[in-house]
């Protein structure tokens, strides 16, 4: 009886651990906008992706290209592979696809599975580049 009780408890713990791991997103954390490939799409601020599916943006468009909308706020998000789905209605700071390379997060309007970054040729396959905040 005691062995059965211990077995049931261990099974329950293992199920809980697996559940938690499945909910972790590679985006989880705070990211700081660092650079962009298109002059008029630069963004300043941070994007925080939380494990509960909440996206907290604290951003504004670059000062030399002012826009009237406030893009900061809390939104919902989820990922499907390297595609992000969100209720963020903006158009600055987040694109449909992402790639994480080391401490950097790249957003792109088209599917991105490898990084192209050739500044001397003005050739990039991303729009927004963010750095993981430590």
Image: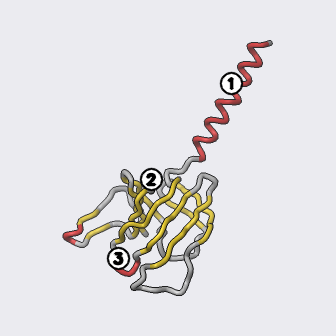
The one of 46 and 126 positioned closer to us in this rendering: 46
Residue 52 lies, with reference to residue 66, above or below; the image says above
Mark 1 and 2 residues: CB-CB less than 8 Å, in contact? no
Marks 1, 2: nearer the viewer: 2
Per the rendering, the mark at residue 10 is 1
Instruction: Give the Cα separation between the discs numbered 3 and 1.
Output: 53 Å
Q: Write the residue at 44% across / 72% down.
A: 44
C-alpha span from label 3 to label 2: 26 Å
Above or below — where is 134 with respect to 120? above
Residue at coordinates 55% horizontally, 58% vertically from top-left?
49
Between the C-alphas of marks 1 and 2, the distance is: 35 Å
Circle nearer the N terminus (1, 2): 1
**Relative horizontal placement of residue 101, taking residue 26 as reference (left or right):** left
Q: Position of residue 12 (x, y in %)?
A: 71, 30
Q: Which residue is mark 2?
A: 134
The image quarter containing residue 129 is: bottom left
- Quarter holding the N terminus? top right
Secondary structure under the numbered disc 1 in the rendered image: helix
Q: Which residue is mark 3?
A: 38
The residue lying at 54 percent from left, 60 percent from top is 48
Mark earlier in primary sequence (3, 1): 1
Structural crowding at the residue carrying mark 2, measured as other residues with C-alpha within 10 Å and reported as few (<14), some (14–19) or many (≥20): few
Image coords of residue 92 (percent x, y):
48, 75
Give me the residue at 68% from left, 24% from top: 10
Label 3: how many residues lie within 10 Å, few (<14), some (14-19) or many (20+)? few
Task: Assign a secondary structure to mark 2.
Answer: loop
Relative to 86, is 31 on the left or the right?
A: left
Q: Residue furthest front?
A: 134
């Amino acid at each position: 009886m005691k062995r059965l009780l211990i077995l049931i408890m261990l099974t329950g713990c293992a199920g809980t651990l697996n559940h938690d791991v499945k909910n972790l997103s590679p985006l989880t954390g705070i990211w700081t906008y660092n650079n962009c490939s298109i002059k008029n799409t630069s963004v300043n601020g941070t994007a925080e992706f939380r494990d509960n599916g909440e996206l907290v943006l604290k951003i504004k468009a670059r000062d030399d290209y002012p826009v009237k909308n406030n893009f900061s706020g809390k939104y919902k998000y989820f990922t499907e592979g390297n595609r992000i789905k969100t209720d963020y209605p903006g158009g600055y700071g987040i694109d449909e696809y992402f790639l994480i390379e080391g401490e950097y997060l790249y957003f792109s309007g088209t599917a991105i599975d490898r990084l192209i970054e050739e500044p001397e040729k003005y050739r990039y396959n991303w729009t927004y580049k963010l750095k993981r905040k430590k």
